[in-house]
Each structure stands twice: as structure tokens, then as C-alpha cells.
Amino acid sequence: MSAVADLPAPVGLPARPGATFGRVLAAEWSKAWGLRSTRWTVAVMVLLTVGLSYLGGSDAAVGPDGYGSVAYFVTSSLVVTQFPILLLGVLLGSGELSSRSAGPTFVAVPARTPVVVAKALVTAAIAALTAAATLGLSAAAVLATPLGAGLSTALTAETTRMWVGTGVYLVAATVFCFGLGMLLRRSVSAVAVAFVVFILDIAMIAAPDGLARVGSLLPGHAASLVSSTDGFVDLLRDIGQLPVGPWGSVAVTGAWAVLAVLGAVVAVRARDV
């Protein structure tokens, strides 16, 4: 009996059994990067923005006077090039539910809430990495063009707001699309709704004053406002067209993201998978 009692503890077994949140988070991270859609959409997002930045900077008809800074030149294009990362958010939210492959995950974690939170955090992390790579490589691409020498690289309050605000916006918008995907459960439906929501802000540029104020409360409004110059922001403020400022618009997108994730938690807990 003493010989048995003196045996060493098994090596490699977890000290704490069960599905801890750390293990759920690690599993969701592995699953997300294991999907070809994740790798492809991240690559498309980065290459599309970098390519457009380089082509724009190489165009002899484009001069530095209209942009002033590398930050404005790069971030202003993301109103158009943001859609791949938004698509990824939808797919990460709806993928398992749409394909009905979420069963084993929720059997392992019956509470379900930790799974949704872990998926949302993984989505935010992937969006943050994608945003950083997109902005950094696009800036490098512009600086490598003839236009780059005429653009300012100084970090001012304006350019910091453009760099940081755009990155935070992309993360919040992607998480919102994730929550939307989990709520609607079907990828096609969620992609269609997300596209309409984020294209509405562009369509409302020429909308009447009342609708423009409504548009400022949409999750996609920050895409254009946070990358705007101080002069344009001041102009909007002077003519009464700035119900929400640049950082406030980012906060609006963040609030939509939180609401979407909370709605996803409620929906996943209430429905069968």
C-alpha cells in the first residue's frame, strides 16, 4: 500500500478538470483560425486596403494637398474596404449555428454564455490584429509611393484620433456583426442585414436633416466621421449637422456591439441549437 501511495502524480493532466473559461477561449481561438474563411477574409481586408492605398499614392493625378496626412489618406478608404472584416464577424457568429455544428460545443459548456463571450472576445482580437495590420501596412505602402513624401506622418490629436479611432471602430463593428450573426443564425440573412445597416450611412450623406440625425446613431456612422479632418468636423458642428462627435460615434458603435452580444447570449440560451 505504501508503494502505491508513493507513486508520482500523472503528468499532463489538468489540475482543474472541466471546461474553464480559459479553455473555452483557447478552443474558440483555435476554431476561428482553423476556418479558411477567417484566413481568407483577413487576407482580403489587408490586401484590398494596402492595394488601394498603393495605387492611390502612385496615381500622378493625386496630390498631397487634398489629404495632408498619411492617416487621413489611409483611414478614409476604410469606409469602402471595411466589409471583409464585417463579413468575418457575421461568419464567426453564425457559422456553427447555421451549419448546426454547435451541438458538441454546448454539450461541453451547457451554460452557453461562456461560449458566446469567448467567441466575442476572439472575434474582437482577430479584428484588432487585422485592423493593426491593415493600417500599418497601408501606411507603409503609401510612404513607398511618390505621394508619400508629401504627406505628414506627425502624430497629432487629429491623426491619433484617425488611427486609434478607426481601429477601435473596426473592432466594435466586427463584434456587432458577430452578435448579429448569432442572433439571426443564418449566414446569408445576417450578411444581408449587416450590409444594409452599414451601407445606410453612406446612403444618408445626402439625406434630409432629420434622417441624417437618425443616421448618426447607426453603427456604421463612425467609419466616415472618425477619419474626417478637424476642419470637416468643425464645419459639421457649425451647420448643426454633428449630433454625435467622432469619439461619440465610436462609442455608439461600441454600444451596438454590446447590445448585439447581449442579445446573442439571450437567444442562444433560449433556443435549441
Image: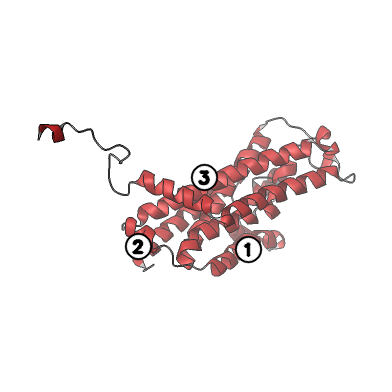
Task: Give the quadrant of residue 74.
Answer: top right
Residue under label 1: 211
Q: Residues within 10 Å of mark 2 (few under 14, many from 20)?
A: some
As displayed, is residue 45 above or below residue 98? above
**Disc 1 packing (10 Å; few <14; some 14–19; many ≥20):** few
Provide residue 156's location: percent of width, then percent of height.
67, 31
Name the mark nearer the viewer: 1 or 2: 2
Q: Which mark is residue 125?
A: 3
Is residue 56 or residue 228 the one in the foreground?
56
Q: From mark 3 to mark 2, how far is it between C-alphas?
A: 24 Å
**Which amino acid is tagged 2?**
Arg
**74 relative to 105 in the view: left or right:** right
Q: Secondary structure at mark 2?
A: helix
Residue at disc 3, secondary structure: helix
Image coordinates of residue 159 in percent, x first then y, are 68, 36
Taking the spot 59% from the left edge, 58% from the top edge, the residue there is 87
Q: CA distance from mark 1 to mark 3?
A: 34 Å
Name the spot of residue 179 as percent of width and height, x first: 48, 58
Q: Which mark lies nearer to you, 1 or 3?
A: 3
Q: Earlier in the sequence, mark 1 or mark 2?
A: 1
Give the residue pinned by disc 2. Answer: 269
**Residue at horizontal 65 percent and vertical 61 percent from the top:** 199
Q: From the viewer's side, name the closer residue of 152 and 102.
A: 102
